Image (tube, rainbow, N blue to C red):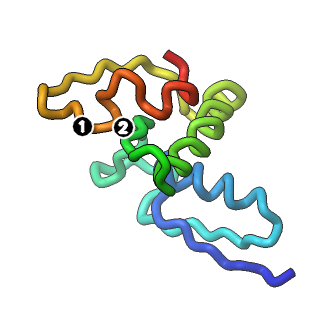
């Protein structure tokens, strides 16, 4: 099988998780390209102080919804099994305007209700 070379740009939570998951396929050779890597401290590098949030906002039945659905179990596994990853669960409160009700996130029965806890 031919090797595929993949470059992941960015070494924050999203970039490193992407690289980790892609690296599980032996046909992929992964390179992470980033100005800063974990352990670096610089005002331009947000990851030591900030994090990524997972809130699916994709429309039901789209490729983006499939991506959202596939992303959650991997993040949940990191939070549950790898505390050193820094990924953890945190409750979220979402504030909205009345005109936001068309957005999937604000529906009373979003497609992801059976994918996510709470």
Return the mark for residue 102: 1
Q: In this view, does 93 lie above or below 86?
A: above
Name the residue located 72 percent from the left edge and 28 percent from the top edge: 81
Name the residue located 44 percent from the left edge and 58 percent from the top edge: 36
Return the mark for residue 90: none
* Residue 27 quadrant: bottom right
- Please identify, in this view, whether the residue under mark 1 or under mark 2 is nearer the observer: 1
Q: In this view, does 6 lie to the left or right of 39?
A: right
Name the residue located 18 percent from the left edge and 26 percent from the top edge: 96
Distance between the alpha carbons at the discs numbered 1 and 2: 29 Å
- Give 84 or 41, whichever is nearer the viewer: 84
**Which x, y percent locates residue 76?**
62, 31
**Which x, y percent locates residue 16?**
56, 53
* Residue 105 quadrant: top left
Q: Is residue 106 above or below residue 30?
A: above
**Mark 2 sits on what residue?**
50
């Amino acid at each position: 099988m031919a090797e595929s070379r993949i470059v992941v740009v960015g070494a924050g939570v999203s970039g490193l998780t992407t690289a980790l998951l892609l690296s599980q396929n032996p046909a992929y050779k992964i390179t992470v390209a980033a100005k800063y890597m974990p352990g670096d401290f610089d005002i331009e590098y947000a990851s030591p102080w900030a994090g990524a949030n997972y809130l699916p906002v994709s429309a039901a039945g789209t490729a983006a919804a499939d991506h959202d659905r596939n992303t959650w179990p991997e993040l949940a596994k990191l939070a549950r099994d790898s505390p050193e990853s820094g990924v953890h669960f945190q409750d979220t409160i979402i504030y909205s305007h009345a005109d936001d009700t068309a957005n999937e996130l604000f529906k009373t029965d979003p497609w992801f209700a059976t994918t996510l806890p709470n």
